[in-house]
Amino acid sequence: MREKVIVIDFGGQYNQLVARRVRECNVYCEIYSYKTDIAKIKDMNPKGIILTGGPNSCYEQGAPSCTEELFNLGIPVLGLCYGAQLMMLVLGGKVEKAPVREYGKIEVSVNTSSALFEGVSPTTICWMSHNDYISQPAPGFDICARTADCPVAAAESPALGLYAIQFHPEVLHTKEGTKMLYNFVRGICGCSGDWKMDSFVENSIKSIREKVGNGSVLCALSGGVDSSVAAVLLSKAIGKQLTCVFVDHGLLRKNEGDEVEAVFGPDGPYKLNFIRVNAQKRYYSKLAGVTEPEQKRKIIGEEFIRVFEEEAKKIGAVDYLVQGTIYPDVVESGLGGESAVIKSHHNVGGLPDYVDFKEIIEPLRDLFKDEVRKAGLELGIPDNLVYRQPFPGPGLGIRIIGEVTEEKVRIVQDADLIYREEIAKAGLDRSIGQYFAALTNMRSVGVMGDERTYDYAVALRAVNTVDFMTAESAEIPFEVLQKVMSRIINEVKGVNRVMYDLTSKPPGTIEFE
Ligand code: GLN
């Protein structure tokens, strides 16, 4: 039995981060809604419980709550922000609107003899984001941290294993936050730290083998991180019983189709059946004359299903279909926490309806993205694949504004390759979150070789982001941008202008369409 800590979600914005940080302490962790039945929580037999932040005020009528019983299970509980306030309120303390709200990095004085703050500096910078505050801790609790404006920045009852902190240790702005979470899960909860990628990989291979027996498995391989890791995991478990179908829709980055084939094809290191479908022309003809972004996306998605379906028919009935679902998809589709967003999985867009199979296998269902990468490295997948940038399902189709044509695909592929080469040469490829070239639908006048030109403008995009929810445009040294510009204009026929996109997200998006 794997040790587990559970995160109870009260709707805060950093809740997935809490779970990720706990897992960085080598403790497995899952997120559940605050509405989860207490009996179910007991059944899961967690080593610890963490209550998250949330937008409400816990003293208001109808605010998300929890029962007092949760604190009497003999399981250590850590409340964060809303969770801390709620714990105090339920146990008889006082929570009210704070005379001074705190937001941002705040200096906190902590009592380092508290088990929660062991090894933490006596004054430390923490991330605060609250309007309410604990004006009086619950009976039996001692105050173990404060700030200039917040008399109870943390309170504890070590005898009961209960801890409440007003700030957010999961946010990286809290300098020693990971240490505090480590102190909680490894110290107070007594977890030994059995969540490691090598054992995850080993156990997954074993359980896939048991489950599949001598059945057959089909996987739609996109060349992205998730589907690649899933495919390799399956290949290690069941070898030739796995068939991967890779659809080259002609909207991939330059050489990408061949790169995927080199890794997963017959000359690559893995044992599996690899089918590459060269559907480029088919996609280009479907996309001819279409300019509206949503319609382009739809055509590309539907065509993918058609192509996949044709291949699946040739293969015949299979026992299992692999999907590269990862944990954030599970949480965001409402199965995990409180998050309201329903995400449609465009990478697997409705496949199950079109393939004759008995069951779905989702080998990465419990993993966060960084854990998928670690599993990939553990499996020996090449670095460039594991650290591949995010790439949208519709591919270059949405990096070409307006109509997609073969000619435009060539232009954007060539420009993008030059951009990537120069970014790598400048040593920036791991430090920039995401960067790519797009083709604007704008043509303008220029002069080249004394001749008037009327050609396209390429837009360069580069953003830094922690979570891809918000992003800032990256500060690329001007010499690097100039080098990219000059190479694109010289080497890519059809381009006479290069622009750099400065827009952050919001109000912009990372992609162009
Ligand atoms: N809504 C509560 C407050 O304003 C809790 C905030 C939070 O959890 N970040 O204090």
Image (cartoon, rainbow, N blue to C red):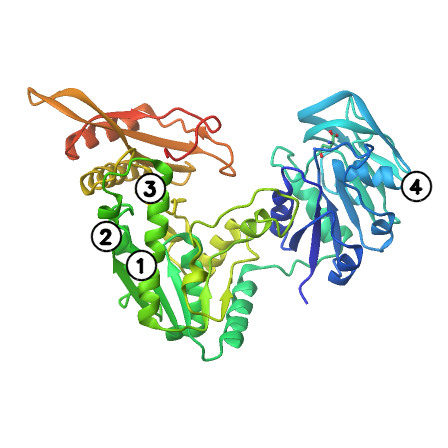
State which tag comes first along the sequence, 2 or 4: 4
Q: Determine crowd level at label 4: few under 14, some 14-19, many 20+ residues with C-alpha closer than 10 A.
A: some
Q: CA distance from mark 2 to mark 4?
A: 71 Å
State which tag comes first along the sequence, 4 or 1: 4
- Asked if disc 1 is less than 8 Å from ligand 1, the answer is no
**Secondary structure category for the residue under label 4:** loop
On screen, 18 above or below 483?
below
Q: Quadrant of residue 289?
A: top left
Q: Is residue 186 left or right of residue 243?
A: right
x%, y% of residue 309? 35, 62
The answer to whether the residue labelled 2 contacts the one labelled 4, judged by CB atoms less than 8 Å apart, is no
Residue identifier under label 1: 307
Q: Can residue 427 be seen in the rendering of this structure?
A: no
| Residue 140: numbered disc | 4
Residue identifier under label 3: 296
The answer to whether the residue labelled 1 contacts the one labelled 3, judged by CB atoms less than 8 Å apart, is no
The answer to whether the residue labelled 3 contacts the one labelled 2, judged by CB atoms less than 8 Å apart, is no
On screen, 172 above or below 395?
above
Residue identifier under label 2: 282
**Secondary structure category for the residue under label 3:** helix
Q: Is residue 389 left or right of residue 363?
A: left
Q: Determine crowd level at label 3: few under 14, some 14-19, many 20+ residues with C-alpha closer than 10 A.
A: many
Q: Residue at x 37, y 53 (%)?
A: 385
On screen, 143 above or below 232?
above
